[in-house]
Amino acid sequence: MRIFLLEVLMHPFFRSRYPRVLVALALASATPGVAQDMAIRRNHIAVDVGILQGGLSYARRVSQKFSIGGGIWAAWEPWSSFDSSILEPVGVELFVRAHPSRDVHLEVGPSVLRYYSQDDCSECTETFTGIRTAAMVGKGVFSLGPTARFGRVTGGSSGSELGVIFGVQLRLLFGWGE
């Protein structure tokens, strides 16, 4: 039996870096979820940064798994499914944030944005009203995830249009309080 164990341990697989990775994964998965199940801080300030877009929000925990909050968001020509151009949207958003674990944040809430539909035209403004969703995953203060705003554009010469504004955000989440 001892010879068999020595032969197994001398195998090239065990002399590589893979066993260390496997041990680290096993320890991480075997560790009790103390860090993950710790109470989410009472107050949060989030700074979201995406490709030519960003936001700032505040949320307050109202229960062990939920927070409510609001913030501002702005972008420069974000990705969208609308036929008309969406230039420089700026707006406010409210949300409910669910915390299934300390490292996962799921959000949903209303979004109202004003934006320009044409370059060099200060009167060409339109309004987007809809629902914003986000799913962020990360460790510590850093999270990353997709965001989508589903809604209707009104106020322009093209009439009303349904579509999606979407992107990927890096979030810096700072919390304080019990």
Image (cartoon, rainbow, N blue to C red):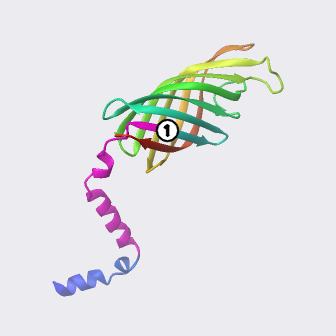
The answer to whether 133 appears left or right of 89 in the picture is left
Dividing the picture into quadrants, the one containing residue 113 is top right
**Identity of the amino acid at label 1?**
Ile
The answer to whether 156 appears left or right of 171 in the picture is right
Q: State the quadrant of the N terminus.
A: bottom left
Say which residue appears at 74% left-offset and 23% top-offset: 117
Q: Which residue is mark 1?
A: 45
Say which residue appears at 67% left-offset and 28% top-offset: 89
Instruction: Give the SS element for disc 1.
Output: strand
Please state the horizontal and vertical placement of residue 154, each as a whole percent of the image: 66, 14
Count of numbered circles on the image: 1
Residue 21 on the magenta segment: yes
Q: Residues within 10 Å of mark 1 (few under 14, many from 20)?
A: some
Residue sitting farthest toward the bottom: 3
Residue 128 on the magenta segment: no
The answer to whether 40 appears left or right of 56 in the picture is left
The answer to whether 60 appears left or right of 35 in the picture is right
Judging depth in this view, the residue of 165 and 140 nearest the camera is 140
Say which residue appears at 36% left-offset and 31% top-offset: 66
Please state the horizontal and vertical placement of residue 93, each as a whole percent of the image: 54, 25
Dividing the picture into quadrants, the one containing residue 29 is bottom left
Please state the horizontal and vertical placement of residue 172, each as a whole percent of the image: 52, 45
Say which residue appears at 59% left-offset and 35% top-offset: 55
In the image, is residue 19 above or below residue 72? below
Judging depth in this view, the residue of 30 and 140 nearest the camera is 140
Judging depth in this view, the residue of 71 and 146 nearest the camera is 71
Dividing the picture into quadrants, the one containing residue 178 is top left
Magenta-tinted stretch: 17-45
In the image, is residue 176 above or below residue 57? below
Residue sitting farthest toward the left: 1
Judging depth in this view, the residue of 60 and 103 nearest the camera is 60
